[in-house]
Image (cartoon, rainbow, N blue to C red):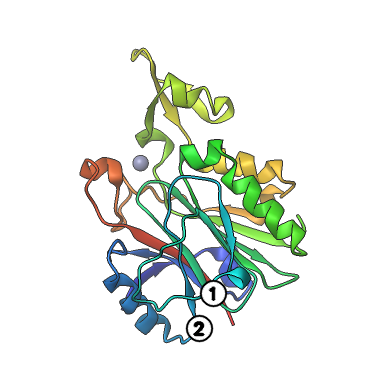
Amino acid sequence: MVEIIKSKILSDAGVVHGFTEGIDFSSEEGFDALQRTLDTSVPMFKVMQVHGNTVCLTSEMSPLPWSEPAKEEADALIGDSAGCVGVVTADCAPILLYCQQTGMTAAIHAGWKGLKKGIVGSTVKAMFQKGATATSILCAIGPCICFNCYDVGEDVASLFPESSDPIAGAEGHYLLDLAQAVEVSLIGTGLSTARIERIDICTKCGSHDLYSYRKSGGDCGRQYAFICRD
Ligand SMILES: [Zn+2]
């Protein structure tokens, strides 16, 4: 069994989804275990994440066996056909979206680089083009590194002035609220805060069994955020 952290708004909407903990998805074993846990035969769509702003649509992709690694480079997947979409993370923010009108799903991998390149806006706008609206999309921002743990330089902080604060007594060091920066991007597309849930669990200092790139010094596994439709 794979332990799964759930979003309240996505659970209330009745959509199969989750943020895994305690099992590594940087290899394919995690995917096999998750498929057994979900007891699903729906196809799996995966991408090779590169901190970019490319968005893929499942209707234009071939599904992969759960145990096969991804080849296509992208950082967001829109489920506009049956199947599961997801992203792997360790400190970056995983974002899951669901359109109550069309049943469309999406998963986004967002670190500061992808956010700066507009990955969140690109994904939501692509969903709008497929029939979703700002009042039909629900969104959950999953476990990621928290404000108190995310020490960045001025170069990064200056990209997110609304979401960063200088650290007193540490010149050139800032704290960045990654989840808030994601929220700012989502609100920029027209979504209201009432339709956005922040799952405030830190990958680095939280009590959940999560992988943290920073805590591990850069050598760790990955958790998986996924959302499925029939
Ligand atoms: Zn933290």
Q: Is residue 11 left or right of residue 154?
A: right
Q: Residue at x 39, y 69 (%)?
A: 4
Above-or-below relation of 159 to 141: above
Q: Within the image, what quadrant is residue 134 found in? A: bottom right
The disc placed on residue 94 is none
**Viewer can see residue 164:** yes
- Mark 1 lies on residue: 228
Does label 1 or label 2 sit earlier along the sequence? 2
Q: What quarter of the picture does the N terminus occupy?
A: bottom left
Q: Residues within 10 Å of mark 2 (few under 14, many from 20)?
A: some
Across and down, in percent, residue 159 comes to 54, 27
Q: Residue at x 22, y 45 (%)?
A: 216
Q: Amino acid at mark 1?
A: Cys
Across and down, in percent, residue 133 comes to 77, 58
Across and down, in percent, residue 189 comes to 71, 45
Q: Are marks 1 and 2 in contact (CB under 8 Å)?
A: yes
Above-or-below relation of 28 to 37: above
Across and down, in percent, residue 80 comes to 65, 70
- Mark 2 lies on residue: 42
Kind of element beneath mark 1: strand
Q: Is residue 25 left or right of residue 200?
A: left
Q: Amino acid at mark 2?
A: Val
Kind of element beneath mark 2: loop
